[in-house]
Image (cartoon, rainbow, N blue to C red):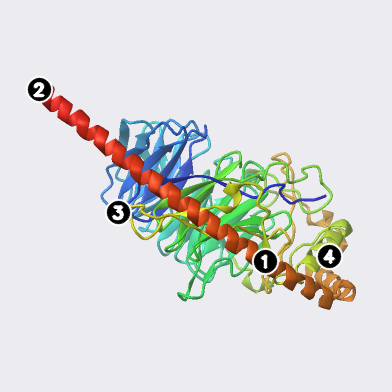
Amino acid sequence: MDYEPTKDPELERSFFGHKDNITCLSFRPSMTQLASGSMDHTVMVWNFPAHLRAYRYIGHNAPVTCVDFSPSGKLLASSSKDCTVRLWTPKAKGEVALFKAHTSSVRSVQFSNDGKSLLTASDDKSIKIWSTKKMKFQYSLLGHLNWVKTACFSPNSKLVLSGSDDKTIKLWDLNSKTCIKTFWDHKDAVSCVKFHPSGSIIASCSNDNTIKLIDIRMNKLIQLYENAHDNPSKGIRGVTDISFSGQNGEYLISSGVDSLIKLWDLKEGHLLYTLYGHKNGPTLATTFSKDGDYFATAGCDEQILLWKSNLKGTIDNDDEQYGRYISTYDPSINEEPLNSYEYNHMNEGKNFYNNNNNKNKNNKENIDKTKSNIPILSNNKSNKESNIYYKPDSVTNEELTNSNEITSNKNNEQSNNNAFSPINLNSNSDNEKINISNIPENSKNANNDINAINDNTNKKVDTSTTYENNNEMTTLLNQIIKQMDVLTQTINIMETRLTINEDRVLNLMKLVNDNGDDINS
């Protein structure tokens, strides 16, 4: 089974309007709007129909840290460093309610999946639950020792997951209003946490430059992506945001301080795409649409990029013979009572569950492909796949420049120190229990399997021929890229001139209309 997408992600649109770093994004469930928040203290709602203008909501007195649409799409919540949460109607009217939520900066806000509750997290080390209908405070969740940077509801709205500057991830049971698990996995502040759509797996990213996936029913680290986003030139590193794709969650997208967007294939356990589109600083926000067909990215370059993922139909959901089966986690159906405790598996190493022999054969082929260090460029099937525009330093949009190419890691290009394992992301019924005895014996030691694969791989690869062919291919691709750069830069200059002329015409029309009004008066 070929799990690779048939097409590369395509840049659909770009949005300009914020005057400072863009910190957060949220799609409206109906896929008619996209909301964004910025350090310029404003919230903007972008309408997808091209003839409709964006709405700018002014009300916060400090940078906006998070935005989230309600499940119905009738409300938009925003949090800010001004210690408040505001509710807006995603129309020209704007604000409908104000919550004086915390005593310090509010870092995160999210609606529950039933829309009845609102979750907020703050630098005052607390997490609060609010009634959306009555717009009243209900209760707090206390336990973090430092700023709570991120929090989210589980898909069934019975659990809350939070991450903090105290380097911990906490899992909260809303029925008992207590912390039932604490994970000490990260070595630095946790920047984002998310529930997998199934509810049994959580993902987290951190300033320690790692992305981790944990099975909360087995208390097991199942995937680890190290050195996810590095910026060696500036001596900084870290992952800023993550998001699962669609309802099945086969993919994960991440943003980081290196200005890149990375798309990870969770079922195969490797980096699938690296997207170059943002410039002038870190990418701070990324999110998938509900159906996974689109994703949006934003950062310090003050622009939002809307991408078509082209990921649908790339996973065989009937492949039920490898990996673990997962279902929505609910403490009330757990076989053993879950008391509040601290769980540390930092010293367990990187022994993850591998899978059956068929998957080992696929992994062997993947490792064969990674013998070459030459990046594989995406097949440009349309202009949108290669021409990714970015905003320059100047705010006046006087020049647009091509931002190189999409680097496709279809050949499973992996970090040297990483050991990833495939996982099955198919969901079963809520009451299904995970039984570790169901995992095949030959799948319980990933390191032994991978070592065996490497031994067989070394015997079959003719490295001299491979490297000669790769050098020739690299030279040819570089020549093609240079020619494409010249063409795209020429087109960009023409588009810029056309935009300037259109602005001049609009200004002249406005001036004529104003003069006509003065004469009539």
- Tell me if residue 92 comes above or below residue 22 in the rendering: above
Please, what is the three-letter code of the amino acid marked with disc 3?
A: Thr
Front-most of residues 8 and 124 = 8
**Mark 4 and mark 1 in contact (Cβ < 8 Å)?**
no
Residue 121 visible in the shown view:
no
Pointer 3 residue = 103
The x and y percentages for residue 142 are 43, 55
In the rendered image, the residue lying farthest to the bottom is 464
| Residue 439 position in % (x across, y down) | 82, 57
Query: Residue type at mark 1?
Result: Pro
Give the secondary structure at mark 3: loop
Label 1 or label 4, whichever lies nearer to me, is 1
Q: Nearer the viewer, residue 416 or 133?
A: 416
Give x and y (percent) for residue 180: 56, 55
Which is more N-terminal, label 3 or label 2? 3
Which residue is depicted at the point 78% across and 56% down? 436
Q: CA distance from mark 4 to mark 2?
A: 81 Å
Give residue 56's quadrant in the image: top left
- SS assignment at label 1: loop
Q: Which mark is residue 364?
A: 4
Q: CA distance from mark 1 to mark 2?
A: 67 Å
- Mark found first going from the N terminus, 4 or 2: 4
User: SS for tag 2?
Assistant: loop
Residue 376's spot in the image, x, y percent? 69, 63
Q: In this orientation, which residue lies closer to the viewer: 248 or 410? A: 410
